[in-house]
């Protein structure tokens, strides 16, 4: 299985924010959408960074409440690890585990084609295990 399979189930919607928006605005977006990260894009839609809950906590921890008035560009992670639609689920799990992050933008043709979270991978794995279990029970019942 690969990332395209997950996005086929989940969808390709990506919530983004521009780098000049404030951290407070981005935080409200995360809360309203009930998500843990947004991609940061330029005027041309190109990927500039990613802003996660962890980035926000780090900014608040060092700058206090005033950090919420700062632009997203000051708190975002600019060196973004991405994957492709063809990336295997196992490879993506290894990337996320070794990098210790929970969200990975999916790139296709130089554009963000989706985003995969660790929750998406867990959901996929649980469904896979349940399908295997059902197949085994059905096989045993036929024997």
Image: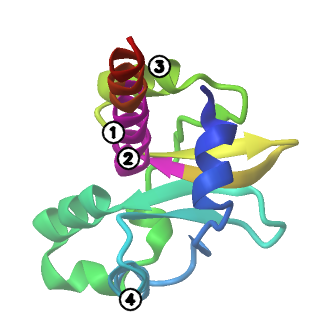
Extent of the magenta region: 116-132
Q: Earlier in the sequence, mark 4 or mark 2?
A: 4
State the residue position of label 2. Answer: 123
Asked if the residue at tag 1 contacts the one at tag 3, i.e. Cβ–Cβ closer than 8 Å, the answer is no
Q: Quadrant of residue 1?
A: top right
Determine whether 73 is above or below 64 in the image.
above
Q: Quadrant of residue 131?
A: top left
Q: In which quarter of the image is residue 114?
A: bottom right
**Distance of label 3 from label 1 (alpha carbons):** 14 Å
**Distance of label 4 from label 2 (alpha carbons):** 22 Å
Q: Earlier in the sequence, mark 2 or mark 3?
A: 3
**Distance of label 1 from label 4 (alpha carbons):** 27 Å
Q: In this view, does 64 lie to the left or right of 12?
A: left
Label 2 neighbourhood size at 10 Å, few (<14), some (14-19), many (20+)? Answer: few
Foreground pick, 57 / 112: 112
State the residue position of label 3. Answer: 90
Label 1 neighbourhood size at 10 Å, few (<14), some (14-19), many (20+)? Answer: few
Residue 64 percent location from the top left of the image: 13, 77
Q: Earlier in the sequence, mark 1 or mark 4?
A: 4
Q: In this view, does 129 lie to the left or right of 72?
A: left
State the residue position of label 1. Answer: 126
The dominant secondary structure in magenta is helix
Q: What secondary structure is found at the residue carrying circle 4?
A: helix
Foreground pick, 47 / 67: 47
Asked if the residue at tag 4 contacts the one at tag 1, i.e. Cβ–Cβ closer than 8 Å, the answer is no
Asked if the residue at tag 3 contacts the one at tag 2, i.e. Cβ–Cβ closer than 8 Å, the answer is no
Q: What secondary structure is found at the residue carrying circle 2?
A: helix
**Distance of label 2 from label 1 (alpha carbons):** 5 Å
Q: Does the magenta stretch include residue 82?
A: no
């Amino acid at each position: 299985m690969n990332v395209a399979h997950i996005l086929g189930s989940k969808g390709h919607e990506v919530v983004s924010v521009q780098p000049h928006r404030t951290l407070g605005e981005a935080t409200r977006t995360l809360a309203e959408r009930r998500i843990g990260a947004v991609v940061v894009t330029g005027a041309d839609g190109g990927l500039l960074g990613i802003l996660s809950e962890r980035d926000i906590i780090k900014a608040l921890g060092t700058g206090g409440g005033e950090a919420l008035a700062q632009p997203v560009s000051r708190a975002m992670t600019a060196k973004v690890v991405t994957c492709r639609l063809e990336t295997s689920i196992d490879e993506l799990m290894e990337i996320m585990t070794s990098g210790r992050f929970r969200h990975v933008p999916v790139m296709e043709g130089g554009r963000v084609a989706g985003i995969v979270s660790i929750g998406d991978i867990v959901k996929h794995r649980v469904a896979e295990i349940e399908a295997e279990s059902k197949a085994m029970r059905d096989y045993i019942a036929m024997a």
